Image: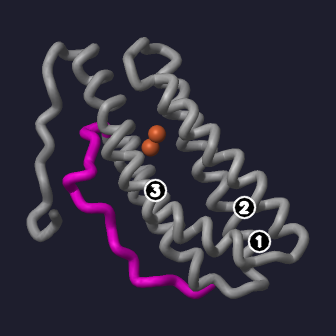
Amino acid sequence: MLMSSSTALPSSLGTGHAGIDHDHEELMALCQSLPQTLDDELPAAFHALHTRFAAHFAQEDALMAQQDFSSRQCHLDEHAAVLQSFEDVGAALREGRMDPARRMGAALIDWLPEHIDALDRHLAKFMFYQQTGGAPVLIRRPGRA
Ligand SMILES: [Fe+2]
Ligand SMILES: [Fe+2]
């Protein structure tokens, strides 16, 4: 597999939840590697990306199942929509069409930071507040936005 030079997520997209942040870094790296993946390796790479996203969404969905807050249903719906796209694009890939999978990888590179900023950060902040009564303090690494 060819690997791209990865552009890590800016630390401004940190949620303050170590497990979620680790997943986001890994998901972004997988998304960034997909466009350079050779055709014969694309089905396995796409399947790995789908599996990793599904596991991450399942973790966040489980966290949200324990909470009741304003953006919960919107957040669950976004996860479900992305997983449906993985199913649809995976079906095209099984028919030998590579372009939708490559386009989805590129689309996810744009979508993931927006999703983190709009919904995941809200979830992490809400959970932190529920546990401590305060807001998390995020420490940014030097040289990263
Ligand atoms: Fe999410
Ligand atoms: Fe997330």
Q: Amino acid at mark 3?
A: Trp
Question: Alpha-carbon distance for marks 1 and 3?
Answer: 21 Å
Q: Which residue is mark 2?
A: 47
Inspect the image, locate mark 1, and give the three-letter code of the amino acid beneath it.
Answer: Pro
Kindly identify the amino acid type of the residue bearing the numbered disc 2.
His
Camera-side residue of 92 and 39: 92
**Start-end of magenta stretch:** 1-17
Q: Secondary structure at mark 3?
A: helix
Residue linked to disc 1: 43
Q: Is residue 6 magenta?
A: yes
Quarter containing the N terminus: bottom right
Q: Residues within 10 Å of mark 2 (few under 14, many from 20)?
A: some
Tell me the residue at 34%/41% (across/down): 118
Picture residue at 25% right of the left edge, 39% below the top: 16
Q: Earlier in the sequence, mark 1 or mark 3?
A: 1
Rate crowding at label 3 as few (under 14), some (14 to 19) or many (20 or more) other CA atoms within 10 Å: few
Q: Quadrant of residue 88?
A: bottom right
Q: Residue 85: x and y, percent?
A: 69, 52
Residue 118 tag number: none
First in sequence, mark 3 or 2: give its number: 2
Label 1 sits on a secondary structure element that is helix
Give the x, y percent position of residue 51.
67, 52
Residue drawn at the location 14% of the way across and 60% of the way down: 141
Q: Do tag 1 and tag 2 residues touch (Cβ < 8 Å)?
A: yes
- The C terminus: image quadrant: bottom left
Left/right placement of residue 82 relative to residue 14 reads right
11 inside magenta stretch: yes
Label drawn at residue 111: 3
Other residues around mark 1 within 10 Å, as few (<14) / some (14–19) / many (≥20): some
